[in-house]
Image (cartoon, rainbow, N blue to C red):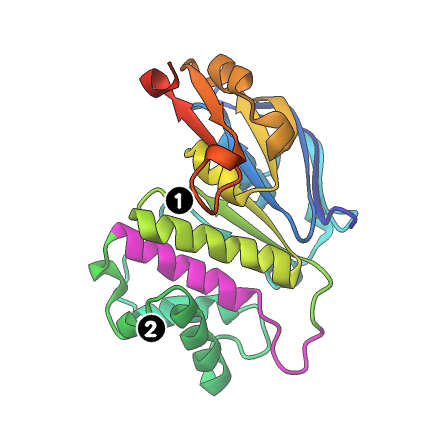
Amino acid sequence: MHPILTANELSVLRGGRTLLDRVSLRLTPGRVTAVVGPNGAGKSTLLKALAGEFSPDSGEIAFEGRPLAGWRPQAIARRRAVVPQESDLRFPFLVEQVVRLGRIPHADGGEGPLAQRFAREALAVVDLLALSVRHYPTLSGGEKQRVHLARALAQLRAGPGEAAPAGRVLLLDEPTASLDLAHQHSVLALARRLAVNEAVAVLAVLHDLNLVLTYADDVVVLRGGRVVADGTVESTLTPELVSEVFGVPARLVPPEQASPGTRAQLLLGPCAA
């Protein structure tokens, strides 16, 4: 399939520092792309640029071949959803109201029975339906993260009378950071199902390389704002690359010796000896 969201030679400068240096990538429907790298590598900066939070200093971002700046905000919001690493939302909204915010770009505008149905269905998918009438600020960090994932799921659904979009993009900024182990896997399994079953192009900024090995198809490795490697997970995430980029010993456990349900495993640090 053709890529839906592309970045070409992106550079971002802030406060005299180069945060991204000629970064290029392609997001393809049906595939999960992980972005990894040490702290300060430019991972979240890249995601924010793809999300349209700011314009790069040079280079271009295109959605379906059109420059991102040329899309109407409402039109792009129906097809691209973002789950940030953190949210500053402090108003005492109910959980369901937060999820309904994802419906604002659509015909229902987040109001009425249809918006409620989509919100409740999305909350059920992320295992939070029981908290739908809780006040959002009272939730734990992990629960808030899952609420925003539900909001993104509701946002990407076409409503009655709306043409089903040919391509959609889900951008996840460290979606597992505040989650326990079970929900780390459930969230990424959900992202993978969206890619495989609904042809969504998923990008996830991740730190856990074994989660990358388990759930991602492709990986972009950043260091110092530059792409040092990219490609399929199997061909790119080698022990040699991990040791070089992250500065820790690494050893790859092949699929036949790895835990059930995983394609392979990386042993890091003293475990790699």
Mark 2: secondary structure = helix
Q: Nearer the viewer, residue 177 or 272?
A: 272
Q: Nearer the viewer, residue 59 or 222?
A: 222
Q: Nearer the viewer, mark 1 or mark 2?
A: 2
Q: Is residue 112 above or below residue 233?
A: below
Circle count: 2
- Quickly name the residue at label 2: 129
Q: What's the magenta region?
A: 141-163
Query: Which residue is at a point 41% across and 58% down the rendered structure image?
Result: 148
Residue 249: x percent and y percent?
Answer: 42, 14
Q: Is residue 99 above or below residue 259?
A: below
Q: Is residue 224 visible?
A: no
Q: Is residue 24 visible?
A: yes
Is 143 contained in the magenta span? yes
- Quickly name the residue at label 1: 85
Mark 1 / mark 2, whichever is N-terminal = 1
Q: Residues within 10 Å of mark 1 (few under 14, many from 20)?
A: some
> In the image, is 250 to the left or to the right of 234?
left
User: Based on the displayed image, in which of its 4 quarters is residue 164 positioned?
Assistant: bottom right
Q: Quadrant of the C terminus?
A: top left
Query: Which residue is at a point 29% across and 48% down the rendered structure image?
Result: 180
Query: Which residue is at a point 27% across and 70% down the rendered structure image?
Result: 131
Q: Nearer the viewer, residue 20 or 39?
A: 39
